[in-house]
């Protein structure tokens, strides 16, 4: 039977766009549909606009530090409208670039929500298409828990479009990376930020010692950390601020905007996956094997909708591997080991490899090297911000199995070191590398003495 397409992709985000372009390059006839904006979460309401807002908010620190370096800045003001609109202009530009990338690869774009009618038929906006193979790349979306008054709260989706001026006070609920990143953004832009988290510290899942360093730095930077706090209900008079946030322990505080960043769920509802024999896991994500193949033989899934490692470069890797394997006669599986990642809070956290807790659980004896120091830039300005670095080495092999950093430019530094970790570099090879002076990064090649004691707060590991 002749199908309209060899491959139909549902969702034109990071994973779907990469997979469709590569598959088309291998000669497949490819269609793709998108129900919001081409580019997906990362480009439209994730990584890119978020990082631009981080850049925007960081100027606050520069202005504070500038006088010690001899600059007179005078009164400093900020226009949220200018930042917001300029960021959206860049988002629009990238959206156009992604559309053109699809066109030039020969991929047919169909705007509208896609739905599977059966294993070989997709419906988009009333039109149906038949296809040999299907890729589900629908990503995820934020989810707000159904506490009374939740309708007053926003998510990261709306945070990019807030009216001008920004509210005086913002409460962010959540302790994950999106919560701490937005806490830093709004704090830098002059809002009073409450960060409300269920646990004792931010960033569960990251290296415990790094979590503590970040947590304390956020508090020191002026964010009010409301730990071990759960919101019971949100009240507002006529739905307008101020909002009164009642906690489960009977407390109450007021804010002018409530943003939930407590979790994201896979976009799997209402798109006909069950009809096509695609099984979901317990969390509602598409269950896939190591080739990204679902339980339906001709249907694959990549990216956040599979809830493996929910990062753009991972979605891209999975999409590329799928297209090479299925259409390029170059079978290769995505490799989810040693994926570096960063949290663009202020100060930044970046990491590759195992946390100390994971290494302790899975490997034998370890040697752990740490360094904590005030960055040179702040010796003159007096800013009380410290940099923390950590190397975890497997004693038996001398391999560096984890590298972690909290401090300025951590993400840029760790990206380079991730190559070394991926290549299996040893501590001796780190030591044999000459530093660049004066930098923070040179610390990573001059860490001489392993820590004698276990990490403080390790007992608190969850
Ligand atoms: P998406 O990019 O979400 O694309 C899915 C697309 O499918 C969307 O465009 C959606 O509209 C569309 N869609 C959904 N259902 C349908 C349907 N039925 N029919 C048609 N289209 C549909 N990752 C990083 O690596 N670094 C970061 O700094 C980072 N920051 C982030 C900040 C925020 C605030 C958020 C929310 C995410 C961030 N991420 C970051 C995560 C990153 O955005 C995702 O991992 C990545 O976008 C996943 O790509 P994807 O292709 O799986 O899904």
Image (spheres, helix red, strand yellow):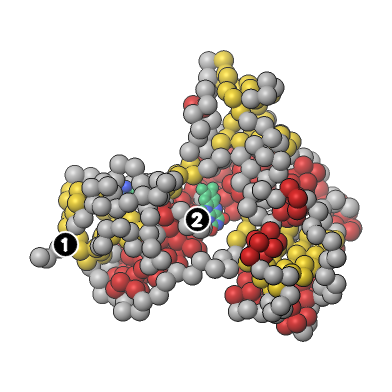
Q: Which mark is residue 4?
A: 1
Ligand 1 closer than 8 Å to the CB at disc 2?
A: yes
Q: Measuring from the top left, give residue 183's x and y in whole percent.
A: 66, 42
Point out residue 93 in the picture as x, y percentages from the top left corner. Answer: 45, 56
* Label 2: which secondary element: loop
Q: Residue furthest left?
A: 1
- Tell me if mark 2 has few (under 14), some (14-19) or many (20+) residues whose alpha carbon lies within 10 angstroms of its own: some
Residue 38: name its quadrant: bottom left
In percent of the image, x 36 and y 49: which residue is there? Answer: 280
Task: Say whether residue 236 is left or right of residue 249.
Answer: left
Give the residue at x 68% y 20%: 250
Residue 419, image quadrant: bottom right
Q: Report if residue 348 is visible in the image.
A: yes
Label 1: how many Cα within 10 Å (few below 14, some 14–19, many 20+): some
Towards the viewer: 274 or 330: 274
Could one spot residue 59 in this view of the protein?
Answer: no
- The image shows residue 197, relative to residue 414, as above or below, that is above
248 or 405: nearer the viewer: 248
Q: What element carries label 1?
A: loop
Marks 1/2 in contact by CB < 8 Å: the verdict is no
Q: Between residues 266 and 94, which one lies in front from this camera angle?
A: 266
The disc, 1 or 2, on the residue closer to the chain's N-terminal end is 1
Residue projecting furthest to the top: 237
Q: Residue shown at 66%/61% (left/top)?
A: 361
- What separation in Å lies between label 1 and label 2 (alpha carbons)? 31 Å
Q: Where is residue 402 in the image (x, y as percent from the top left)?
A: 67, 67
Q: Nearer the viewer, mark 1 or mark 2?
A: 2
Would you name the residue on which mark 2 appears?
A: 310
Residue in the image at 67% along x and 40% along y: 199
């Amino acid at each position: 039977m002749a199908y309209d397409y060899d491959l139909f992709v549902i969702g034109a985000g990071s994973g779907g766009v990469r997979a469709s372009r590569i598959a088309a390059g291998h000669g497949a006839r490819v269609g793709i549909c998108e129900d919001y904006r081409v580019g997906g979460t990362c480009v439209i309401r994730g990584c890119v606009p978020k990082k631009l807002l981080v850049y925007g908010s960081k100027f606050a620190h520069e202005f504070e530090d500038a006088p010690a370096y001899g600059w007179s800045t005078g009164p400093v003001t900020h226009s949220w409208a200018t930042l917001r609109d300029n960021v959206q202009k860049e988002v629009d530009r990238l959206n156009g670039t992604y559309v053109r990338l699809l066109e030039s690869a020969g991929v047919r774009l169909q705007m509208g929500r896609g739905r599977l009618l059966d294993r070989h038929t997709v419906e988009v906006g009333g039109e149906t298409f038949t296809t040999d193979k299907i890729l589900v790349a629908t990503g995820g979306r934020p989810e707000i828990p159904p506490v009374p008054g939740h309708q007053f709260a926003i998510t990261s989706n709306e945070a990019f479009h807030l009216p001008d001026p920004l509210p005086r006070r913002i409460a962010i609920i959540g302790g994950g990376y999106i919560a701490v990143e937005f806490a830093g953004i709004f704090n830098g832009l002059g809002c009073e930020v409450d960060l409300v988290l269920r646990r004792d510290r931010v960033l569960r899942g990251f290296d415990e010692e790094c979590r503590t360093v970040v947590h304390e730095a956020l508090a020191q930077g002026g964010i009010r950390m409301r730990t071990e706090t759960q919101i019971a209900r949100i009240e507002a008079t006529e739905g307008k601020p101020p909002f009164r946030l009642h906690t489960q322990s009977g407390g109450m505080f007021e804010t002018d905007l409530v943003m939930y960043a407590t979790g994201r769920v896979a976009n799997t509802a209402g798109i006909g996956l069950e009809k096509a024999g695609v099984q979901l896991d317990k969390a509602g994500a598409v269950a896939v094997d190591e080739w990204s193949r679902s339980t339906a033989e001709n249907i694959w899934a990549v990216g956040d909708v599979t809830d493996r490692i929910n990062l753009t470069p991972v979605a891209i890797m999975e999409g590329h591997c799928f297209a090479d394997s299925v259409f390029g006669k170059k079978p290769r599986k995505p490799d989810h080991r040693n994926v570096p990642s960063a949290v663009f809070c202020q100060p930044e956290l970046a990491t590759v490899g195992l946390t100390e807790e994971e290494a302790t659980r899975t490997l034998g004896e370890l040697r752990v090297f740490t360094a904590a120091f005030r960055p040179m830039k702040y010796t003159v300005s007096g800013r009380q911000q410290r940099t923390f670095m950590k190397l975890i080495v497997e004693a038996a092999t001398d391999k560096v199995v984890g590298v972690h950093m909290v401090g300025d430019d951590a993400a840029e530094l760790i990206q380079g070191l991730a190559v070394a970790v991926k290549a299996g570099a040893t501590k001796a090879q780190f030591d044999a590398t000459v530093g660049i002076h004066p930098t923070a990064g040179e610390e990573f090649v001059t860490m001489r003495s392993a820590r004698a004691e276990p990490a403080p707060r390790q007992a608190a590991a969850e």
